Amino acid sequence: MAELLKGALLLFVMLNPFLLSLYLRDLFEDLDAKTFASVMARGALIGGAVFAIFAIGGDRIFSDVLSVRFASFQIFGGVVFALIGLRYVFQGPAALRELRGTPEHIAGSIAMPVLIGPGTVSASVMLGARASIAQALVAIAITVTVVVVAVVILKRLYDVVKRRNAALVERYMDFVGRISALVIGTIAVELVLRGIDAWRPN
């Protein structure tokens, strides 16, 4: 049970509703609360389905289907998230908006690359390895639901506070974003180290 909770917590940290709120800031401003919640739910369904596939298939997806080692994916994922963290530290929210690209298909752009990324896929594989398939799927469903609810609540708070104090919102976004970037960077380094440990000979 402890390993299951650790895996679910890792997935939650990688999804990071506070960082997601920054990543989706333009949608916070452009969409009303009901439409935003609907779009988030569709994006979460896409993400949850991918997480479930990797939790069930595990690292066999990499070794049997892609003919690569899971350790290589961990190292690559760590490097990607380290670059995202560094870009945010130096560029601020603009770095994440650039990553999301144009929102022709909003639900898909929410799912990629923050919901479905090297970090969250790695967390799903680890979750599937630490628990039974049923437990892993339940943990993924609960974690994704909690993240979606948290982001929708943050959207509503944003709407209320933005009308009253725009300057306060700007300072909050900047502060939380930089703290989140530090957390993401730290996890990125850990992914690289785990990948190196798994890759090098015993």
Image (spheres, rainbow, N blue to C red):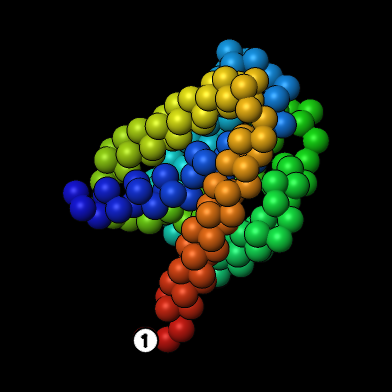
Q: Is residue 131 above or below residue 202?
A: above
Q: Residue at x 62, y 43 (%)?
A: 171
- Tell me where residue 111 appears, x and y as whole percent: 61, 37
- Tell me where residue 160 appears, x and y as whole percent: 57, 20
Taking depth in this image into account, of 185 and 154 the one nearest to the observer is 154
Q: Residue at x 30, y 53 (%)?
A: 6
Q: How many marks?
A: 1
Q: Is residue 144 visible?
A: yes
Q: Is residue 31 above or below residue 48?
A: above
- Say what amino acid the circle numbered 1 marks: Asn
What is the quadrant of residue 158 in the picture? top right
| 122 on left or right of 77 | left
Q: Characterize the local packing of mark 1: few (<14), some (14-19) or many (20 or more) Cα atoms within 10 angstroms.
A: few
Q: Secondary structure at mark 1?
A: loop
- Tell me where residue 36 appears, x and y as whole percent: 61, 20
Taking depth in this image into account, of 81 and 132 the one nearest to the observer is 81
| 1 on left or right of 50 | left
Q: Residue at x 52, y 41 (%)?
A: 18
The quadrant of the image that shows the C terminus is bottom left
Q: Is residue 66 visible?
A: no
Give the labeled residue for mark 1: 202
